[in-house]
Image (cartoon, rainbow, N blue to C red):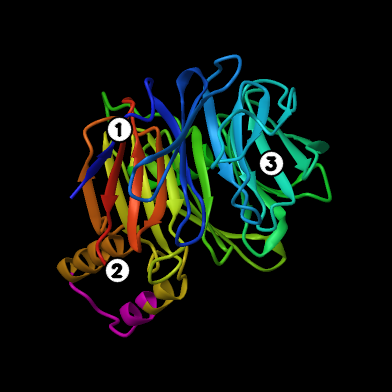
Amino acid sequence: MAKLWREGHSTAILCVCASPGPEGLVASGSENGEVAVWSQEGCIVGRLNLPGKEDCTSLAFSPAAPSLLYVSHGDTVSTLDPRNLNGPVEEFVGVGEEEINALALNESGSTLALADDSGAVRILELPGGKVCRTLRRHTNICSSVAFRPHRPNNLLSAGLDMQVMLWGLQKTRPIWTLNLQDVAEEEDDHQQRPGQLFNPPLAHCVSVSSCGNIVACAAEDGRVHLMRVGGGSKLEQQGALKAHCQGASQAHFIPFLSHPYWLATGGNDGRVSLWDVSKHPVVTPEGKVKEKQRKGKSKVKRKGEEAREKDEAETTETSGPKVNVDHGDKVNWLCPALLKGTASLLVADQSSSLTVYPLPEV
């Protein structure tokens, strides 16, 4: 049963993050520079209005030091002590060329990546906040960044130029770039019918599974695009989930469930979904091979059998969500969290409250 966490904000919540660990805190940021820190029960630990009253666009707890919380607002990143919200401990002013949209920390907490409206991705050394590298390949707003687990020098970025890029931070050019528009045009169901319109696949949110090999990207075409990264950081395969009937705004792998391929998504259609993508051909390509081998055993098939097998294969590739919630409002942010040992999804929407959905045991 869903719970509401209230009284942390007076404006719409734009971003949420959870500190790792069994007793970790939850932080949320909203319009006009409001930051709130919550206990796992949903009680307010502290509140802060950042100077300048610029929207809080992203938050990230340090995995190495839970007493450090990074918040982006305007072109600035502020470092906060979540248990003592009297003001910023440190400010990195002007580290974004324009408004910052997303933050990501590597597993050691020594590197902070940020994406901004200019399309640039900047890499900061921590502590200190020195800009050590600027990555410029996106031709429109860069909306999201995520480090690959177990590979601290590999960074994913996604933007409104419909590009997903994998970077090796030793260089200033991407290892590979995937144009989601090209992928969408290859999909059979994107053959446009008379009077039918499709949104372009502007890339909003990128996430990487805890094993580091599967990437998910929520896009404006309502799909969550999946990519498999193989040896040598090469892009081996890509595909998609037909996740939402309007733009997909959020996609996050959940690292604490039964396997690393549970994926939570949210969209402009007001739906929140939980997917098991472990059998998707991008994640488990041998499944497709077995299907072909099974089909090859029978040399002669009636048309009805062929059609049925085609339907079965498509169902396997794009099977529906395990949980599908009609949240009823456009989703601004999703955050998986373990709250008092219960796997949960924190949802921020157009309101000033957080909604908490407990997940079934999977």
Q: Position of residue 6 (x, y in %)?
A: 30, 32
Disc number at residue 113? 3
Q: Measuring 50% from the left and 40% from the top, which residue is drawn there?
A: 205
| Magenta highlight on residue 340 | no
Q: CA distance from mark 2 to mark 3?
A: 32 Å
For the image, the number of numbered tags is 3
Q: Residue furthest bottom?
A: 297
Front-most of 349 and 175?
A: 349
Instruction: Give the residue number, with chain letter if any, for mark 1.
Output: 6
Q: Give the answer, above or below, for where 338 lies relative to 199.
A: below
For badge 1, the amino acid type reads Arg
For badge 3, the amino acid type reads Ala
Query: Element type at marker 1?
Result: loop
Task: Specify whether residue 185 is in view.
Answer: no
In this rendering, which labeled residue sits more in front, label 1 or label 2?
1
| Magenta highlight on residue 301 | yes
Front-most of 330 and 225?
A: 330
Mark 1 and mark 3 lie on one chain; the one further toward the N terminus is: 1
Q: Position of residue 12 (x, y in %)?
A: 38, 23
Q: Give the answer, above or below, for where 132 lies relative to 300.
A: above
Instruction: Give the residue number, with chain letter if any, for mark 2.
Output: 362
Front-most of 34 and 359?
A: 34
Query: Element type at marker 2?
Result: loop
In this rendering, which labeled residue sits more in front, label 1 or label 3?
1
Q: Give the answer, above or below, for where 137 lies relative to 281.
A: above
- What segment carries the magenta color? 291-302
Query: Element type at marker 3?
Result: strand
For badge 2, the amino acid type reads Val
Q: Position of residue 347 (x, y in %)?
A: 34, 40
Badge 2 crowding class, 10 Å Cα cut-off, few under 14, some 14 to 19, many 20 or more, is few
